[in-house]
Amino acid sequence: MNPSMRELTAIAPLIVVAGTALVVVLVDALWKTNRNLSPALTLAGLVAAIAFSFPALGDAPATAAFGGMVRTGGFTSFFTLVFCVSGLLSVLLSISSVEEMIPVQGEYYALTLFAVSGMMLMAAAGDLVVFFLGLELMSISFYILAGFARGRMTSNEAALKYFLLGAFATGFLLYGIALVYGTTGSTSLAGFPLRTGGLQQPLLLLAGLALLMIGLMFKVGAVPFHMWVPDVYEGAPTTVSAFMSTGGKAAAFAGFLLIFTPAVLLTQPALRDVLAVVAATSMVAGNIVAVSQSSVKRMLAYSSIAHAGYILSGVVAANPAGSNGVLFYLMTYTMMNAGAFGVISLLEKPDGSMLTFDECAGLSRRSPLVAALTAIFMFSLAGVPPFAGFFGKYYVFAGAVEAHFTWLAIVGVLMSVVSAYYYLRLVVLMYFNDQPAGSPVTGRPLGLAALIIAAVALIGFGVFPSVLLGLTAHCF
């Protein structure tokens, strides 16, 4: 295959990120004493990838490259933005905390870039084989990053659990791809809905699609494939948890939108109904269990399960309103969840012990800026206007109502009310409880800068949601 300049330009963001990862590996091998070079190169590579993705944001519909194996256009470029923003926030939060975890840092940033490369490959996949390659590149990077704090038993346990369960889920996904190929005769996603109609063995195709759905449900942390989420998020380094819960979840939802398109879900109503039940169960289970948590990090882990249910509501809608709502939600969720985990990374103790709700009491007196940023993230996660989280929920629920899944939207609204309890509980403790023994949050200026960027974006997208909606309009 001789790629044309047009094709190489189309995947320029992917080339930049993957190339930067290789450069970081080389730099770390040759100049270990310069600890600032690897993170600087990583940030530069991610910013360059964002710059290269902007020209294609208005391209719709998607066009094929490399013999149909790769898709280009607004959908791919939008997800590239989401992944790179997630990576940028994670790196900015990690720069000082990585030194505390382990002296050797270069591989941390290389693995972050490789994970972003895998995510980008998933969103750009025009074929199930390419999607699987991207998924494995991302997953293997996450397995290692989860156990990066080698001196902590909880980090080692998180990496082992994630690896074992992730490998199990990969088996489901791969077997599903095999069944789909056996029934349709192709792994290409181009014209996939057309090939699923009028087959001689519809039950075999249904089984293949169900296995694909199971594999993706594991990656987004939806019930009943969610049991790994709280343990892995709690045991992994906090900045890694932020990265996995945002970029990793967004990449899996890109797979949902690519494979389970409206045409596929409308022709397979049984799968659509199952997905609706999974969405509702995830919202209920995630929020109910989160209420009883005393650890802030574990609370966010369970709430991420609930947010997976909210976003699945937009996928179930199988209409333009739901699909655009999913994209809007994923971008805003990246900002608010990365910010929430980022606050924990600033407040948690050096020994890695879990930050509890009680330890956050009186934070507004010790660190007014950090408390204000935390309040913004909690309000947005709860869906309180005028923050962007409110509009994310509004758009996915509006899509569900339009598709006559009103009951699913009602469950989502009720569970959002439940979530307000534990999100706002943290805000009340910070501002209205007596100040406990503790010291102000100092240092980590880059981490604070990342939190400020995320908070400003949430306010901006909340006041002017049409800015983000204008980008999603060109993705389908």
Image (cartoon, rainbow, N blue to C red):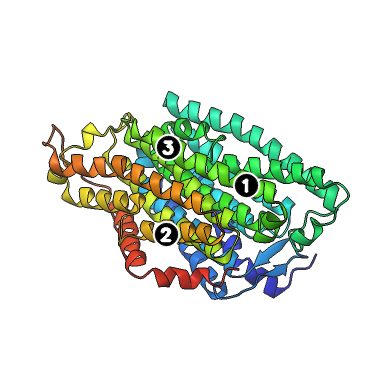
Judged by depth in the image, the label closer to the viewer, 1 or 3, is 1
Relative to 452, is 135 on the left or the right? Answer: right
Which residue is depicted at the point 33% across and 55% down?
Answer: 450
Whichever of labels 2 and 1 marks the residue nearer the N terminus, that label is 1
Q: CA distance from mark 1 to mark 3?
A: 24 Å
Q: Earlier in the sequence, mark 3 or mark 2?
A: 3
* Secondary element at image label 1: helix
Q: Kindly report which numbered mark, 2 or 1, lies closer to the viewer in this rendering.
A: 1
User: Would you say the residues marked 2 and 1 are in contact, meaning their CB atoms lie under 8 Å apart?
Assistant: no
Query: SS of the residue at dot 3?
Result: helix
Q: Which residue is mark 2?
A: 394
Residue labelled with disc 1:
273
Q: Residue furthest top?
A: 153
Could you tell me residue 444's position as x and y percent? Answer: 28, 48
- Left or right position of 264 against 460: right
Q: Amino acid at mark 1?
A: Asp
Q: How far apart in space, not on screen, are marks 2 and 1 (Cα)?
A: 21 Å
Residue 292 location (% of width, % of height): 34, 30
Residue 385 x %, y %: 30, 59
Q: Which residue is mark 3?
A: 302
Residue 113 visible in the snapshot: no
- Crowding at dot 3, Cα within 10 Å, few <14 / some 14-19 / many 20+, comes out as many
Vertical side of 30 occupied by 61: above or below = below
Q: How many marks?
A: 3
Between disc 3 and disc 2, the foreground one is 2
- Which residue appears farthest toward the right when viewing the image? 200
Q: Is residue 63 above or below residue 310?
A: below
Q: Amino acid at mark 2?
A: Tyr
Q: CA distance from mark 3 to mark 2?
A: 21 Å
**Type of residue at label 3?**
Tyr
